[in-house]
Image (spheres, helix red, strand yellow):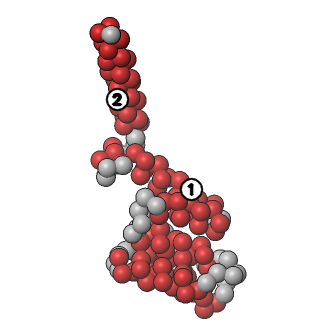
């Protein structure tokens, strides 16, 4: 019994060391090491930001909407995500304008001076007035 417990302790310690080594390698591979300390989930947050940026580059409203909704589970009050969901939702002909307007109002209430939110709000308002797609320039 004693040998089994010692063996189990050695195996668990070894697994912990491997996990720690993997985290150290991932941390050293980050171009911006401050991202690892950004919040309690720094590495995953950086990966989510990269995925969101890639979806924006595709200019596919359905993909942006899906990725932004997935990320909203981790950051439910992110004003940029709320604005992106509102803007991507406007591309759908059958979308509810009130929902998009409500999301934009929430985003502006959270971050009234954020240039990205203001840019997205301007683009959605212009889209409503002209009914032609307008792609905002997101300032990072």
Query: Quarter holding the N terminus?
Result: top left
Residue at coordinates 46% horizontally, 55% vertically from top-left?
49
- Labels in figure, total: 2
Q: Residue furthest front?
A: 1
Q: Are marks 1 and 2 in contact (CB under 8 Å)?
A: no
Please say whether residue 135 is visible from this viewpoint: no
- Neighbor class of circle 2 (other Cα within 10 Å; few <14, some 14-19, many 20+) is few
Position of residue 9 measured from the top left corner of the image (x, y, whole percent): 31, 18
Q: Can you tell which mark lies on residue 97? A: none
Position of residue 112 measured from the top left corner of the image (x, y, whole percent): 35, 80
Please tell me in which quadrant of the rendered image residue 10 appears.
top left
Earlier along the polypeptide chain: callout 1 or callout 2? 2
Marks 1 and 2 sit apart, C-alpha to C-alpha, by 29 Å
Position of residue 14 measured from the top left corner of the image (x, y, whole percent): 36, 19
Residue at coordinates 36% horizontally, 37% vertically from top-left?
27
Query: Quarter holding the C terminus?
Result: bottom left
Q: Residue furthest top?
A: 3
Residue at coordinates 59% horizontally, 63% vertically from top-left?
66
Location of mark 2 (residue)? 20
Q: Residue furthest right?
A: 93
Q: Is residue 52 left or right of residue 42?
A: right
Please tell me in which quadrant of the rendered image residue 16 appears.
top left
SS type, badge 1: helix
Q: Is 96 placed above or below 13 here?
A: below
Location of mark 1 (residue)? 54
Position of residue 110 measured from the top left corner of the image (x, y, whole percent): 35, 76
Front disc: 1 or 2: 2
Please say whether residue 8 is visible from this viewpoint: yes
Residue at coordinates 54% horizontally, 81% vertically from top-left?
100
Q: Is residue 95 left or right of residue 81?
A: right
- Which of these two is toward me, 19 or 140? 19
């Amino acid at each position: 019994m004693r040998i089994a417990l010692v063996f189990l302790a050695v195996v668990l310690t070894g697994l912990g060391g491997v996990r720690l080594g993997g985290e150290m390698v991932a941390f050293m591979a980050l171009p911006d090491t401050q991202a690892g300390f950004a919040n309690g989930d720094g590495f995953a947050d950086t990966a989510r930001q990269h995925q969101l940026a890639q979806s924006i580059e595709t200019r596919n409203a359905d993909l942006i909407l899906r990725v932004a909704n997935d990320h909203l589970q981790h950051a439910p009050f992110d004003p940029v995500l709320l604005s992106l969901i509102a803007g991507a939702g406007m591309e759908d002909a059958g979308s509810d304008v009130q929902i998009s307007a409500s999301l934009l109002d929430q985003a502006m209430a959270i971050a009234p001076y954020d240039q990205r939110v203001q840019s997205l709000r301007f683009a959605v308002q212009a889209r409503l007035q002209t009914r032609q797609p307008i792609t905002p320039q997101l300032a990072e």
